[in-house]
Image (cartoon, rainbow, N blue to C red):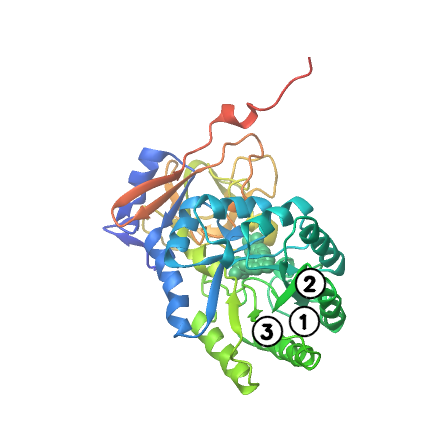
Amino acid sequence: MTVSSHFTHKNGLLHAENVPLDTLAAHHGTPLYVYSRAALKEAWDSYQSAIKGRNVLICYGMKANSNLAVLNEFRQWGAGFDIVSGGELARVLAVGGDASKVVFSGVGKQAWEMQAALKAGVKCFNVESEAELDRLAQVAQETGHIAPVSLRVNPDVDAKTHPYISTGLKENKFGIAIEAALAVYERAGTYPSLRVVGLDCHIGSQITEVSPYLDALEKLIQLIKTLAQRGINLHHLDLGGGIGIRYTNEQPLSPGELIDKVFATLQAHGLDHLQLVLEPGRSLVGNAGALLTRVQYLKPGDARNFAIVDAAMNDLIRPTLYEAWHDVEAVSPRETGPDTPVYDIVGPICESGDWLARQRQLNLQPHDLLAIMSAGAYAFSMSSQYNTRPRAAEIMVDGQQVHVVRPRETVESLFESERILP
Ligand code: LLP
């Protein structure tokens, strides 16, 4: 059993949908990112069926995987997008995305990015500080726009996830402290170039329980009531992204559980007229991807056995950055027994931190193919060219069909724009 029902062994060979992964490796080389369109659709549908006619907008947190093919599928299915840069906005527009379904998050928006988003007509800016509010008001005024604004507040709740991906605590750089938010909303009201439309928070990522969301929601509801008493009425409430996925045996909350409990709480407070916005990233794409890599060398040792593969931390940095666990599946598994060695799966980069998985019992031979699972989110999108390694190709499988959605980079392309001194 793998973590995704769209990556399964059939006749002893790991497939993405109906395509055997050894065939993909033979045609396209390794390391190779392989995505399943059916898995994307299934994840999307899990949100759609959870909505049950309620007013919910799903803005895909596209930093998780911003390949145009992925964006275009979500766009066709009706998604909006959560963007964090002018670059991400350009990607959304490149696939014909509807800017009126785009929310713009991030603590460091620059003036040019604000201008581009105003011109495109985004749904709202999730403003994260007073200084940003002032700048946005100025940019909007100078360009003759009225900027729709939501404040991202920091509710100071513990998302119970890895500290590097926890964002809703006071010590994090994100959002406006919830106690300070009323004053910032009132300040926003003094600018003719701003229009207050919502309230936003995002408390972290890879969250597996519903309780941190409900803790945050209670605090936001108190704020919404205080705002209403001051005559500030909101159109939407954005609870950010964060729903976790199964990397190995986690049992994360479902979109249905979250949306049902949120609406039940809103209803209890007479606030279910608000539109709910969610910004899921990982839960829409994480288990729709695998990173295919080939074993180059086996290096047995006294302390550790290493399997040196052709993928590396430049392709997938999550293990070394967060000590993240990704399941490793042999594409063509051999039998294992008590004597089967335990390997650290490492890449060729000159850093001890260059590892993809540790202490995995696998019956390996050089040239074997391995699939690093759950590599659809924060995988290619966080990749680099460190050690002058071209970034991997990306493939989208759809049933039996194979689409190259990003060719492998060439070595020459990595430095073709560089110049030596005259
Ligand atoms: N909205 C905002 C404002 C965000 O900052 C994020 C993610 C999301 C939505 C989407 O969150 P998701 O549904 O994917 O949890 N690189 C890390 C994850 C960083 C998440 C950053 N923010 C990792 O590989 O685990």
Which kind of residue does numbered mark 3 sit on? Pro
Residue 145 location in percent, x, y? 63, 54
Tell which circle, 2 or 1, labels the residue nearer the N-terminal end: 1
Task: Give the CA distance from mark 3 to mark 2.
Answer: 16 Å
Q: Which residue is mark 1?
A: 155
Rendering coords of residue 389 (x, y %): 52, 32
Residue tagged 3: 212
User: In which quadrant will I find the N terminus?
Assistant: bottom left
Assess disc 2: are there few (<14), some (14-19) or many (≥20) residues with their C-alpha within 10 Å of its C-alpha.
many
Q: Is residue 142 left or right of residue 344?
A: right
**Residue nearest the viewer, comparing 178 with 395:** 178
Which residue is nearer to you in this view: 250 or 232?
232
Element assignment for label 3: helix
| Separation (CA) of disc 3 from disc 1 | 10 Å
Instruction: Decide: few, some or many residues near mark 1? Use Cα within 10 Å; few <14, some 14-19, many ≥20.
Output: many
Query: Mark 2 highlights which residue?
Result: 175
